[in-house]
Amino acid sequence: MTVLVLAGGGVGAAALAHTAAVSNRLADRIAPARTAVSRLESGLLEQVAAVRGYVITGNPALLGPYEQGVVEERATAQRVRALLADEPAARRDLDAALALADRWRADFPARLIAARQGGATAAELAPVVERGGLAFEVARRALTALEARLDRVQAAGRADLDDARALRDLLFVSILAALLLSSVVIAALVRVTVLRPLSGLGASVRRVAGGDFDHRLTAEGPADIARLTADVETMRQRVVDALKTSRRHRDALEEQAAELRRSNEDLEQFAYVASHDLQEPLRKVASFCQMLQRRYGEQLDDRARQYIGYAVDGATRMQNLINDLLAFSRIGRVYSDDREVNLAEVLAQAESNLSGPIAEAGAEVVADPLPVVHGDPTLLTMLWQNLLGNAVKFRRPGRVPRIRVEAVEEEAGWTFAVADNGIGIEPRYADKIFLIFQRLHPRGTYDGTGIGLAICKKIVEYHGGTLRLDDGYAEGARFVFTLPKPAAPVSVPAQAGVPAQAGEPAPVAPV
């Protein structure tokens, strides 16, 4: 296409240049030369008229036009010679005509003017005038012949111009036809060499995208398309390798999931055994020890009664540990009651469950307006109950417990805080308190098993939030937790939980 465009442009430029040259020769040389020759002829006629007038009247003023005509004739002749530089025959005719004119002026006008100025009359000069007219006609006929030659040259120039224009039009039509034909040929070549391989590549890609990952792509067509096909084939191979790796990982995950299900079933069985089979012997030990103490208490000494108390206390603590461990393991696994929960109602239920300890300690609970969130009401009740019970339990001696519940709305969700004026927690224990069965005080100082805050942390994290200790709070202990806002209308994942023991608050981690 580039060669064709360049060749067509060169031919078209040559045709335009030829047409312009023919047109310029005709318009800039031949036509002005023809007009100038006509002006030479008319100038000679004016010279003849001026000489005859002077001979007849003897008025010297009539010699001015004659002399001016001679000057103009010579200037016009010089210009005509320049215009006919490429026309040697016409220049020869011009020179011959001008030579005849010069001879006429030398033989007759000059003699007539000199004779009239010498006193000769018009009648005496009439024969000379007659002979001068004949000589003038010879010179004028030479100019007329030159005009006829120039007319023929001008006609030939017009014919050449018409031929040049016709040739130009033919060349441009031929160039346009060649461009159109080449466009059709190139389109056919593109379809055969480019589009067909691309269509094949697209069909192969769609086949691979449809799931036939083992279908190999074969490079066809030009080098660029072949490289593209090779790149796509490389990508397909990588996808196949990644798919095989993913399938191996999936199989491994399925095996792990099956193993995890078996493990969960074992844990469920263990939970059942712990809640029934293990607790039954503990209850029997505690019951028979208490019966032994009631029936034979008077026959036992103080040391024997102390041993029986140790046994009852150990069995009771073992039961509490088993119950707390079961409650911890059931969070997110047993219950699934995801719905909108009014936290104000949940907090009121937790306060109702803790009404005994709160009344005994004379505690004051002040809460901000609480929102409605998505979650499990049982788990959220357990959360509030453990945090409030923690604040009441670890109160400072001689001080009325004051508990403040705060709620702040943020872009991502809600931030809640439970602050008290109790004994507080040292910042170095901020992480330890959330571990299961971690106690910061001797067993006899505060009741509980040390699992309460671990349960709270697991409940908050199950709802998608975080729980931490505010280590910058100095008036007591302040726990801060967050609950996210679900994107409407998507529901928050189902929650699950275990209610606290009836008649007593859920155990909380001791300080």
Image (cartoon, rainbow, N blue to C red):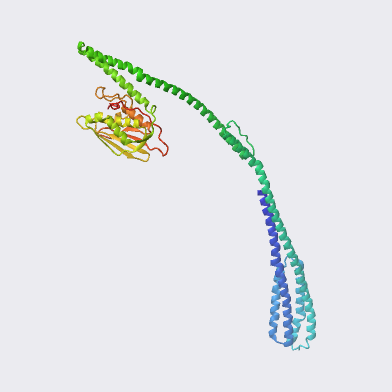
Left or right of 428 in this view: 178: right
- Between 99 and 461, the residue placed more toward the observer is 461
Residue 12, above or below 429: below
- Between 92 and 330, the residue placed more toward the observer is 330
Residue 292, above or below 119: above
- Between 120 and 11, the residue placed more toward the observer is 11
Quadrant in the rendering for residue 132? bottom right
Residue 174, percent across and down? 71, 54
**One can see residue 130 in this view:** yes
Single out the residue that lies furthest toward the top: 299
Quadrant in the rendering for residue 56? bottom right
Residue 368, percent across and down? 29, 39
**One can see residue 470 in this view:** no
- Between 181 and 64, the residue placed more toward the observer is 181
The residue at 46%/23% (across/down) is 258
Residue 164, percent across and down? 72, 60
Left or right of 165 in this view: 317: left
Residue 333, above or below 299: below
